[in-house]
Amino acid sequence: MSPSAPSDHGAGIDGLSEVSRKAFSETSDPAAYVGRPASDATLDAVDRWLEGGSTVCALVATPGLGKTMLLRVVEARLGERGMASRTGAGRPNALYLPYAGLGPIDLAIWVHGLLGRPAPAIAEAGEAVAALARLGEGPDAPFTLLLDDADSIPPETLEAITSTLPTERSSLRLLLALNPDSKGSRLIAALHALAPQEIRYRERLSPVETRAYVRARMRWAGFAAAEIDRVDDEESRRIHALSNGIPRAIHAVAADRLHTASTIRGAEGLGAKRRREDWMGRPIEDDLEF
């Protein structure tokens, strides 16, 4: 999937700054997703997990590689599928949470609040997880909770999850984003009773992918075609070398280089304007004294 472009604009330093912030902010808008073989394969693996029956899946990826974006894309796709298959106004079938460091009762109350539902009357940890499971419509139409920074899940919540949910065919599915470190490994080990599936995502962008990625993000944000064309093979190699092919670093490097380039061009344009004015001479003064 490649992001579609809004209206083409961005002339002038202020305009370039505006679209640059949109193109390379840290906000993960699924509409801005730029597909490539490694990320598309990872999403395909998540789809296969969703089609299967296991309750928990761990998406393990290098920091900055785009775990949050992948979670948001999965959330958007599940929402589209849910709306297409359900009658009436539809019922949310997935929710992304930016962190998971809550006890089970607080987690259940938060999720219901985000969905615009009344807070469930719960007094025990197991009841909280059961209340989350009731957000689904059964094993064939489960509710999927997508948890970022999932290694922040506290022990009491892990205990409630493992003691309440079945290993498979659950009305509540959990997709957990983790880093490939000791904290992530400990969380997976704590969930061993649910036999969590692991999906590894670690391939960085190549120079060619970096060029396609930067240009696609610029196109989506509304950069003028002339500005997009400035990201040629040479410029994309520079961005790749400075970012090491990690999307989060690509955003920072690309935004900085575009800002610097636009500032230089703006200064050059101002200098050229002044040179033209100097060549034309000073304005004629009509208020002569007699």
Image (tube, helix red, strand yellow):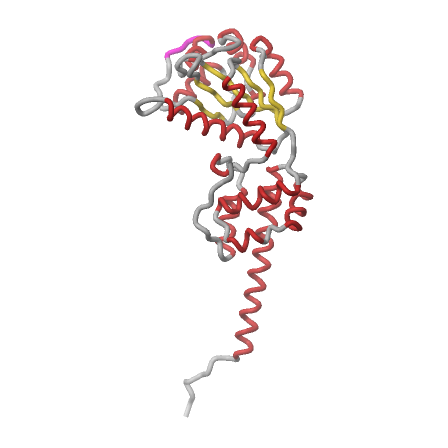
Instruction: Give the camera-side residue of 199 and 284.
Output: 199
Left or right, 167 with respect to 112, comes to right
Across and down, in percent, residue 13 comes to 52, 56
Residue positioned 49% across, 30% down in the render: 73
Percent across and percent down for residue 159 are 54, 9
Q: Quadrant of residue 227?
A: bottom right
Magenta-tinted stretch:
121-125
Q: For residue 124: magenta?
A: yes
Q: Is residue 9 above or below residue 130?
A: below
Report the side of 14 relative to 62 (left or right). Answer: left
Residue farthest to the top, as pictured: 163
Name, please, the residue furthest toward the right.
241
Where residue 269 appears, x then y in whole percent? 55, 64
State the image coordinates of residue 15 (x, y, percent, origin top left): 48, 53
Q: Examine the structure image and report whether residue 232 is included in the region drawn in magenta.
A: no
Residue at point 60% right, 10% down? 192
Work out whether residue 154 or residue 80 is closer to the camera in this orientation and state it.
80
